[in-house]
Structures are given as structure tokens and as C-alpha cells.
Image (spheres, grey):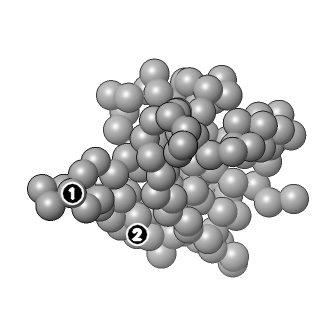
Amino acid sequence: MVKSSSTKQQRSRVSHYERLKAGDIPIYEPGLTELVTQNVASGCLRFTTDSAKAVKESELLFIAVGTPPDEDGSADLRHVLAVVAINLSLIKIAKRKVKPSLLALLSRSDKSSPN
């Protein structure tokens, strides 16, 4: 069993974080809601706004950050890269024998189906 955490860096979006904890997934991926619900219920997946706590307690960190379009229409990765940098610095200084793995996810920021 892998213990994992998802952090939400923008504290002003706490309501978004609370929705995730309640199982309301804001993106569409087939089967994702069921997978998240099952893993939250089993204690394998947690959501937090505390990156340091997530690094300390998790084996795997998921980073899911919105990627609004850049001026040329490509994904604006500034927010993703900022969160990755924060978490990498925390992983680097973590006093653990086994450091957690880091996974950044890029996805649509709405629930609309890809069809």
C-alpha cells in the first residue's frame, strides 16, 4: 500500500481543497472519481495544503496544478514549476531514509468530457 498526498499551494482556494477531500474531483478522467474515493476511504490518499507534512508522511506526492493557456496557446507551466520547486526543496531537506517520489500531473481544469 502506497501512502500518497496531494497538496494545494494556493491557500485562497481552500474551498477547492475541501471539495477534493469530499470526493468532488474538478477534472474529467474516466474512472478517476471512483479511484480517488476508494483510496481516500482506505487512507492511501490524502489531500493537504501543507507541503512539508506531505513530504514527511508520504511515499508519493501528486501535484495537480492548473495550466491555463500561455500567450501562444501552449500550457502555462509557471505554477506547476513553482510547486515542483517547493516540493523538491522540501524533499531534499527531509530527514528520511527513503524520500518520497514526486509526480506532476497536467490535465484539463474542468469536468468536461474530452468528447
Marks 1/2: CA–CA distance: 30 Å
Q: Which numbered marker is on residue 7?
A: none
Is 50 drawn above or below residue 57 in the view shown?
Answer: above
Q: Which numbered marker is on residue 89?
A: 2
Residue drawn at 51 percent across, 69 percent down: 91
Q: Which is nearer the N-term, disc 1 or disc 2?
A: 1
Is 90 drawn above or below residue 63 in the view shown?
Answer: below
Is residue 49 visible in the rendered image? The answer is no
Image spot of residue 65 (x, y percent) = 41, 49
Is residue 15 visible in the rendered image? The answer is yes
- The amino acid beneath tag 2 is Ser
> Toward the viewer: 106 or 43?
106
> Toward the viewer: 73 or 1?
73
Image spot of residue 5 (x, y percent) = 63, 50
Residue drawn at 59 percent across, 59 percent down: 61
Is 16 drawn above or below residue 7 in the view shown?
Answer: above
113 sits left or right of 34 in the view: left
Q: Which numbered marker is on residue 73?
A: 1
Image spot of residue 108 (x, y percent) = 44, 46
Secondary-structure class at tag 1: loop
- The amino acid beneath tag 1 is Gly
- Total numbered labels: 2
Image spot of residue 20 (x, y percent) = 59, 31
Which of label 1 and label 2 is nearer to you?
Answer: 1
